[in-house]
Amino acid sequence: MDNNREKVMTLKDAIRTYVTDGCHISIGGFTVSRNPMAAVFEIMRQRKRNLHCYAHSNGTGVDELIGGGCISKVEIAYGGNGKAAPTCIRFKSAIQKREILFEDYSNYQMSLRFHAGAMGVPFIATRSGLGTDILKKWGFSEEMRATDPKLPDKKIEILDNPFNGWTGASKVVLVPAINPDITIIHVQKADKYGTCRIEGLNFADVDQVKASRHVIVTCEEIVDTNMLREKPEYNQIPFIHVSAVVHVPYGAYPYECCNYYDYDPKYLSQASKFAKDDRLYKEYLEKFVYGVKDHEELLSIVGKEQLERIAADKRTGYATGLDRR
C-alpha cells in the first residue's frame, strides 16, 4: 500500500464503501471503553442488514447494532455496560426471542482467534475451555457451516497433544481464526495515511485490525505524520492495514476514550431503561440515531454541559469528579 495515499474520508462515505449487507464485521473496544460508536450509529442510519459481527467483550456497540436490526449473527465473549446493563439488553432479548444466532467463546479464546487471524494461520492451540460447556454448545449448525464459506466447519476441535510429555497437557483445543471483511476501531490519534496511536489499553484492537481485509479508523485527532514519528514506539497500527481514516471527535461517545473523555453514566443509564421496553427503545432510536444526521448532531442533543462533565483529567486520563451513580 502506498504511504503517500491519503485515506481521509467522511464517516458516511467510509461506511457506505466498506460495510455492505451480509458482510463479516468486527468492532473494537471493550465494554465501556473506545467502542467506535459514531460508526455504529452511522451503520444503523444507513440501515445495513444481515451483518455477521465479531467482538471481544463489547457493550453498547454490539447492543445498538442488534437493536437496530443490523446483525443476524454474532460471535462474542461478553456483552455488557457495567452496572448500567451487566448483560446487554437488546442482545439478551434478541437471543431469547431467537431473532439472531450467536456463538460464545471465552475472552481468552476470542483474543486467540483474532491473534490467529492477524498471524495468517487458520487456527491456534490453547487449553482454554477444557472442562467447560463452551466447547459443547455450538451456535451455528454443521449444515449452516457447510453452506457458508466464511464459517469454519467446526466451532472448535479437541486434539491429543502431539508433544505430550514435557508439557503435562494431554489435550489441546484448536480455535479457528477470525478474518473479518471489515474492522472498525476508534483511536485517539491517527495521521492521514492511517498510522494510529492508541492511548491506554488497546484490548484486542491491534489483532482485529491486522486480521481484517479492510479497516476503518475513527479518531479524535488527525495529527501530522512527523509527530507520530517522533516516538514511533507508541504507534501500534501501521498505515498498511488501514483503508479509511475518519476524524470524529467524541467518536466513542457515550463510552470513554482515555485522556479525552470518560463514559457518560447518565446516557448509558437512560439508554438501558429505554432498551428494556420495545416502545421506548423505538422512541430512543428515532431521537438519538435516526433523528440526527450525524454524530455531531447527537452530541448537540447531549449538550456542552454534559460533555464538560465527562472531560478527562489530564493527570489521570479519566473524569475524576464524575457522578457515576
Image (spheres, grey):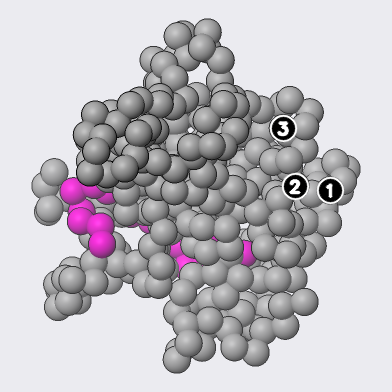
Cβ atoms at labels 2 and 3 below 8 Å apart: no
Q: Is residue 240 magenta?
A: yes
SS type, badge 2: helix
Q: Could you tell me which residue is drawn at 22 percent across and 34 percent down?
A: 163
Residue type marked 1? Lys
Q: Main secondary structure of the magenta part?
A: loop
Q: Residues within 10 Å of mark 3 (few under 14, many from 20)?
A: few
Q: Is residue 106 above or below residue 323?
A: above
Please indicate whether residue 96 sits to the left or right of residue 209 in the image. Answer: right
The answer, for residue 13, to whether it is visible in the render is no
Residue 89 is labelled as 2
Return the disc, 3 or 1, that comes first in the chain's sequence. 3
Please indicate whether residue 93 sits to the left or right of residue 48 in the image. Answer: right
Q: Is residue 35 above or below residue 98?
A: below
Cβ atoms at labels 2 and 1 below 8 Å apart: yes
Query: Disc 1 designates what residue?
Result: 276
Q: Which residues are magenta?
A: 236-254
Residue type marked 2? Ile
How far apart marks 2 and 1 lie (CA) works out to 6 Å
Q: Is residue 248 magenta?
A: yes
Residue type marked 3? Ile
Where is residue 111 shown, x and y percent of the image?
Answer: 40, 47
Q: Could you tell me which residue is drawn at 67 percent across and 63 percent down?
A: 82
